[in-house]
Image (cartoon, rainbow, N blue to C red):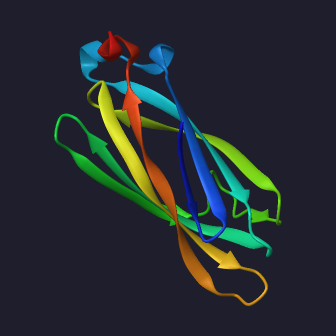
Amino acid sequence: MATQITAGVKVSVETVYQPEYSNPENQHYMFAYKITIENLGDYSVQLLRRHWYIFDSNGTRREVEGDGVVGLQPVIEPGELHEYVSGCNLKSDMGTMEGDYQVMREMDGSLFDVKIPKFMLIAPHRLN
C-alpha cells in the first residue's frame, strides 16, 4: 500500500491485477485500484479535480485530468474518509501511477493540491 499525507489529507492506494479483464496476447493488462482519502485536519474539504500521471513500462506516458473522482466531488468532514475504486489499463504488465487532487477547504474556499503517492501496477507473474 502506498500512502502520503498533504496538508492534513491522507491518501492511501491499494492495487489489484484484473486477469479476467486482461488479454496479454493483445498487450492489454487491466488493474483496479482502491483509493482511501482521509481528512486528518480540523476543517471540511471538498475534492474538486484529479490529475493523474500514468507510466507504462513500454515507455508510454499518459496524463488524465478531470472533475472529481468516479463522477463525485465528495465533501470529507474532519475525521471522515472517502473511498472509491477505479481502474487503469496498460499495454505492458507493469507500470506506475501518481498524481494530485485539487481540494477546497470549505471554511474559506482556499484551494490546495493533495499528492497522490506513486504506486506500482504489476501483474503477479512479474513478481516470481
Q: Residue at x 41, y 52 (%)?
A: 98
User: Residue 112 location, x and y as percent?
Assistant: 56, 78
Q: Residue at x 74, y 52 (%)?
A: 82
User: Residue 119 location, x and y as percent?
Assistant: 43, 41
Q: The N terminus appears in which quarter of the rendering?
A: top right
Residue 19 vs residue 25: left or right? right
Above or below: residue 61 compared with residue 90? below
Residue closer to the observer: 13 or 68: 13
User: Residue 3 location, x and y as percent?
Assistant: 55, 47
Q: Residue at x 22, y 35 (%)?
A: 57
Residue 9 vs residue 81: left or right? left
Q: The C terminus appears in which quarter of the rendering?
A: top left
Above or below: residue 22 compared with residue 75? above
Q: Residue at x 60, y 82 (%)?
A: 111
User: Residue 12 location, x and y as percent?
Assistant: 59, 46
The answer to which quarter of the image holds residue 5 is bottom right
The answer to which quarter of the image holds residue 106 is bottom right
Residue 88 vs residue 84: left or right? left
